[in-house]
Image (cartoon, helix red, strand yellow):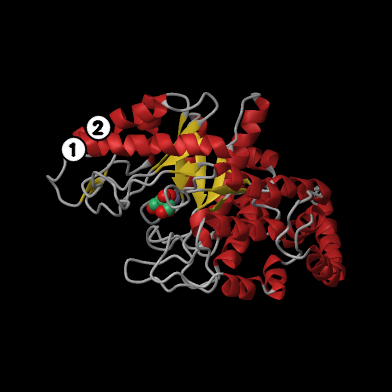
Amino acid sequence: MTDIKNPVIDTNLVAEHNAQQQADLQADYEALGGMLARRGVDIEKLTALAGTFAVAVPSWGAGTGGTRFARFAGRGEPRNVFEKMEDCAVINQLTRATPAVSLHFPWDRTDDPAALKEIADGYGLGFDAVNSNTFQDQQGQDHTYKYGSLSAQSGAARAQAVQHNIDCIELGQKLGSKALTVWVGDGANFPGQNNLRGSLERYLDSMRDIYGALPADWNVFIEHKLFEPAFYATVIADWGTSFAAATELGPKAKCLVDLGHHAPNTNIEMIVARLAQFGKLGGFHFNDSKYGDDDLDSGSINPFQLFLVFNELADAAERAKSGATDFNPAYMLDQSHNVTDPIESLMSSAVEVQRAFVQAALVDRNALRAFQESNDVLNAAQTLKKAYRTDVSAILAMARVRAGGAADPVAAYRSSGYRDSAAERRPAKAGASSSGIV
Ligand code: AOS
Ligand code: ZN
Ligand code: ZN
């Protein structure tokens, strides 16, 4: 069991909750174990594997999100990075699947990174990739990003955006991060607004400066997105451009796949396979969507797609193992919670991503290969479905309980009364939101 020095939720409450669930969980676990044993699968191995899973929580996801129409504030929302960390601590304490937080600057900027790190340590939290923000202007900023940031025509705006990214790296270093994620909204709303090639050339020049400031053990993740806020042409619109940019920059530059950043029906698992094949898969922003960059909870719309993504990741991990190479993409959530309690959404989303990870490990890869080689299409497809249809909930719950988390994180959270106490402790700041349209 991983000990957390300063747990936010009373550990007795978690223990009581687990004791109440114990008999049912044990029965479900044994039934599943028996079924898996008949398939030649050892449930204990899968439970141990589930315990290794980790996905980072986005600090901005702890606040209620919004759309371009409105934001309906939630009760007890975090008002600063320290309160966001407290919420993230709850998520990890109960799920034991989110031991790191991905910060976003300047939203989460602090003058006292040492204090932030110390608090995070107490919660048992580390820091994953830090995110820069040049998609909105900040108060008192000299040059606007209205017409772009890293690719802007204005050299002064570009220099300011480069410097902001370098500042993010420096702050991230103090916190123990090892990567910078760069997403820019740069692009054009009208044909003719920008020279399409010139914009990418300027973006690359700026990124070269940022790349040059990366510490030796850091990576930079390039996040592509089809459209929004640019509605005609986005500078880093797709994985092809992202791949070209990452290749141009060098080995420390990799591509980040946000599941919501593609045209509807895009075969995202194939993008994952391609990037993994060429050593450029840096990480993920997990979420789900129906139409565009909806930032819905992971697995809420298309859980089969999430499973197929993890099926490619499992394949890539197996290949890396046999080739004795490294394969370690960063897993992060990037969601906007408009109508749910963000803590509940982030906990259940982390569990959904973990579920896909475990289901992918259930795929009988030898059988799949044999069916593929003999062109037994139906059985190849059924091999994937068999793993996907297996309800691994008891494995996930058992892994949580063994690690000190809650059998049912949402139920335990609700019974803790955390949201009520947060609402009392954190009266809303009028008109303020450090999260926003994502
Ligand atoms: C924007 O659409 C992206 O998903 C970025 O990852 C962004 O930095 C994040 O969503 C916070 O706004
Ligand atoms: Zn994202
Ligand atoms: Zn997005």
Which residue is at a point 76% across and 51% down the rendered structure image?
5
Mark 1, residue position = 153
Q: Position of residue 28 (x, y in %)?
A: 82, 65
Q: Give the amino acid type for the residue marked by disc 2 in the picture.
A: Arg
Which residue is at a point 72% across and 64% down the rendered structure image?
9
Q: Of the numbered discs in the image, which one, if any, rests on residue 202?
A: 2
- Category of crowding for the residue at label 1, using alpha-carbon neighbours closer than 10 angstroms: few (below 14), some (14–19), many (at least 20): some
Q: Position of residue 101 (x, y in %)?
A: 57, 49
Which of the 4 image quadrants contains residue 313? top right
Which of the 4 image quadrants contains residue 298? bottom right
Q: Is residue 268 left or right of residue 160?
A: right
Q: In this view, does 208 lie above or below 372?
A: above
Q: Give the amino acid type for the residue marked by disc 1 in the picture.
A: Gln
- Category of crowding for the residue at label 2, using alpha-carbon neighbours closer than 10 angstroms: few (below 14), some (14–19), many (at least 20): some
Q: Is residue 191 left or right of residue 244?
A: left
Mark 1 near mark 2, Cβ–Cβ under 8 Å?
yes
